[in-house]
Amino acid sequence: MAAAPQQNKIVRWIDHRLPIFTFMQHELNEYPTPRNLSYWWNFGSLSGIMLVIMIVTGVFLAMQYTPNVNMAFDSVERIMRDVNFGWLLRYLHMNGASFFFIVVYVHLFRGLYYGSYKEPRELLWMLGVVILLLMMATAFMGYVLPWGQMSFWGAKVITSLFSAIPVVGDSIVRWLWGGFSVDNPTLNRFFSLHYLLPFVIVGVVVLHLVALHQHGSNNPLGIDRKGPQDSIPFHPYYTVKDMFGLGVFLIIYAAFVFYMPNALGDPQNYVQANPMQTPLEIVPEWYFLPFYAILRSVPDILFIPAKLAGVLCLFGAIGVLFFLPWLDTSRVRSARFRPVYKWVFWLLVIDVAVLGYCGAHRPEGWFILAGRLSTLYYFVHFIILFPVIGWLERPLPLPTSIAAAVTRKGGAPLGAASPMEKH
Amino acid sequence: MADAAQPKPMDAHTHDSGTRRDFLQIAATSLAGIGAAIAVWPLIDSMNAAKDTLALSTTEVDLAPVQMGQRLTVKWRGSPVFVDHRTADEIKAADAVDLGSLRDPQTDAQRVQKPEWLIVVGVCTHLGCVPLGQKPTDPRGAYGGWFCPCHGSQYDTSGRIRQGPAPLNLAVPPYQFTTATTVKIG
Ligand code: HEM
Ligand code: FES
């Protein structure tokens, strides 16, 4: 497969006019990649594959789905019962959303642990945060489409958040709804945007990859590549590793799709939407729970009423990620060489898990306190601990090069056993 | 490419600040920018409630079958409206409240046209859930009005917020009694 573009006449003819083969050769085949990437580096390509799966299953679902309040629920039931393989398309799409978020969250925490957001990858990181925001909007609107009870009331509660904005809040909410409540106009626009946004995500992903290829991947040591002894070509080494990871991932994904397709969903969403009756408990999908907990936990802050404060913290929780490259004052990227941050990182993981747990329960009893403390910690972590640890911590000595750290011979060019020669 | 051969306009007229070409450039770009911004308005406004949605905004209710102490739910603009045929005790309880203790101070008289008929929009002013209390078996909260299951807001027999996160009283929709026993909401 390593055929150089010059070898085939047709390939050469095309490449001369549209340098697509040169481009692929350069970006995939020769693209020098650190030789020490771990399996945590699989989650980027997995995210890309999930995006493709979501778009493909979504386009085919849209051929059968009807965005009208009187027909939407029935059209989804028809997809499940009557359309050939409709159940498969829907379960792939429904569980696909969950797995997309799992993969992206792991990808994001990987970045946090190994300092992948630091110079020179600040824009790469910020584009990732933009993708996360777009994904959240897409998933939120997609969940409204089947028009179950949770679809309706989730949409109602989340859109009502904007009414917290002083003065113009109510007009904004009515503008979002296109009427006086979540209703047919709302469903129609959500379908339109749910179809559109994934393609916007594709665009941002392209920018994300351009930024990635500018400086290449970070690696578990967090030090720059210093020469050819530190890199291997992306193909075949990482294409193979990515494929293996994909195989494992697909087994787990398929186990959910085929054996427990509704395990991650809420049974209330198999009840058709009823605007006159609120279900006893409104719970978002699991991937929104930590943010939902933040929204509900925040009390009145000074002169800001709780409702507005909750909304501000909800958006702030993601907004703060944009500033990480500047909030982190440590010049060392990888947590491996940061004896304090290494542990504090896990506090964040625990904190987000606690938030998620609180988000799934009514804010009563000790959940109120746990929700408030974990919300407080989330912001303290980024806004206070990040800069302070960077100042106070004394990092361990960094290895002189990737090769020195990961090979016994320490830096002898990889070519000795000639795995790089592919012909 | 052609530019290279041309004299730099800056050299031709060096007034104290900028040239005529600078002015034209700034003026043209600003105008195009303003034009583009204005062109966005029809797109945004198309998402506001359409005329037919606005036209659907009245509901007639026959009050004759509603007994004293009974509560009726009707649909108005896609949301529930609570019609409460209040008992004398409930009216008295609503009147007796000290305004100073209210988050959104309003007298009961400001919220009803006829004291025995309380008509309010059944949408919690916190985040839009439908409070419980319409059915006799529902919880009504500590103040005898309505209880919102979502985050625990409690409303009194005048639909005023008494406890919980909601900031405002249940809204009173515009309505008028068209006969002694029918009311037009909206
Ligand atoms: C970023 C990618 C996407 C995400 C995260 C996403 C997420 C979701 C979610 C969470 C649902 C609700 C599933 C359920 O509970 O039934 C849904 C439904 C739906 N989505 Fe997507 N989606 C994506 C891309 C797309 C695309 C590109 C299309 C169309 C071209 C599409 C079309 C649909 C349709 C028609 C439904 C309603 C049918 C159903 O509920 O299964 N989706 N989406
Ligand atoms: S929506 Fe009623 S208390 Fe939150």
Image (cartoon, rainbow, N blue to C red):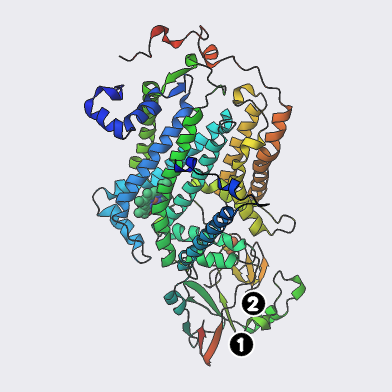
Q: Are marks 1 and 2 in contact (CB under 8 Å)?
A: no
- Kindly identify which chain the residue marked by label 2 belongs to: B
Residue at the location (59% across, 25% down)?
Answer: A334
| Residues indicated by labels 1 and 2 sit on the same polypeptide chain | yes
Q: Is residue B182 left or right of residue A308?
A: left
Looking at the image, which residue sits at the far bottom?
A: B179
To which chain does the residue with label 1 belong? B
Task: Find out if the beta carbon at label 1 lies less than 8 Å from the nearest ligand 2 atom.
Answer: no
Residue drawn at x 46%, y 64% as measured from the top left: B43
Looking at this view, is B140 or B107 the one in front? B107
Question: Residue visible at 30% across and 49% down?
Answer: A87
**x and y percent of residue A253 in the render?**
38, 37
Residue B163 in percent (x, y) is at 67, 65
For the N terminus of chain A, which image quadrant?
A: top left
- Mark 2 surroundings within 10 Å by alpha-carbon count, few (fewer than 14), some (14 through 19), many (20 or more): many
Query: What amino acid does circle 2 point to?
Result: Ser
Please tell me the numbered disc located at residue A159.
none
| Residue type, numbered disc 1 | Lys
Q: What residue is drawn where x is 46% and y is 35%?
A: A210
How far from the left and from the top, in percent, is residue A251?
A: 36, 33
Q: Which residue is mark 1?
A: B114
Query: Where, quadrant-wise, is the C terminus of chain A in this rendering?
Result: top left
Q: Position of residue B34 (x, y in %)?
A: 54, 61
Answer with left or right where residue B84 lies relative to residue A45: right
Whether residue A399 sits left or right of residue B183 in the image: it is right
Look at mark 2 in the image and give the residue it sits on.
B158
Q: Looking at the image, is A214 positioned above or below residue A36?
A: below
Query: Which circle's residue, 1 or 2, is located before the other in the chain?
Result: 1
Mark 1 closeness class: few <14, some 14–19, many ≥20 residues within 10 Å:
few
Instruction: Inspect this view and state whether residue A279 appears.
Output: no
Name the foreground residue: A38 vs A128.
A128
